[in-house]
Image (cartoon, rainbow, N blue to C red):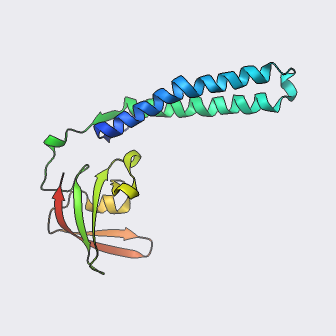
Amino acid sequence: MAQINYYTAEGLKKLNDELNYMISVERGKISAQIAEARDKGDLSENAEYDAAKEAQGLLELKISKLETVLATARVIDESQLDLSKALILSKVKIKNILNGSIMEYTLVSEKEADLKQKKISVDSPIGEGLLGKSIGDVAEVKIPSGVIKFEILEISR
């Protein structure tokens, strides 16, 4: 059985929009490219036709993968989440114990992660280290150069 993927309502809408765009727009574009290349004659020596067919195969693979992700997707009900622990969709304020810097991140699914928006994946080293921790706990995060310790200062939604 496929792994269940958890998303915010916004994240799930983005995935659905992406799938709909690929099906309704991209498929048509590639079909037109194939038809145009086919009209140019001998398909055995037609590089445009081969490229269009390859693009079609890649698009169908992307569509298939996205359909699988959506089939296993579940929307998280934020009102039911425990605020005493860092969980997916928690906004966590942390302090790097070594240098005292304070950061704030929202823990999200891997597909919704975006460091520019301060959204980190629960599957990332920091995300994994923070999951299940409470305010005042110290999360030890393993990185290639050793271990970083973060103190949990605040958990919110």
Q: Which residue is rendered at x = 14% and y = 41% of the image?
A: 79
Question: Which quadrant of the figure has residue 7?
Answer: top left
Task: Indicate the position of residue 13 as horizontal and vertical percent values.
Answer: 36, 33
Task: Indicate the position of residue 101 as horizontal and vertical percent values.
Answer: 29, 75
Question: Which quadrant of the figure has residue 48?
Answer: top right
Question: Which quadrant of the figure has residue 99?
Answer: bottom left
From this view, report whether residue 82 is shown above or below residue 47: below
Task: Indicate the position of residue 50 as horizontal and vertical percent values.
Answer: 76, 30
Q: Nearer the viewer, residue 33 or 99?
A: 33
Q: Nearer the viewer, residue 121 or 91?
A: 91
Q: Which residue is rendered at x = 36% and y = 54% of the image?
A: 123
Q: Quadrant of the N terminus?
A: top left
Relative side of 31 to 74, left or right: right
Q: Tell how many labels.
A: 0
Q: Which residue is rendered at x = 66% and y = 33% of the image?
A: 55
Q: Which residue is rendered at x = 33% and y = 74% of the image?
A: 148
Task: Indicate the position of residue 87 as horizontal and vertical percent values.
Answer: 22, 52
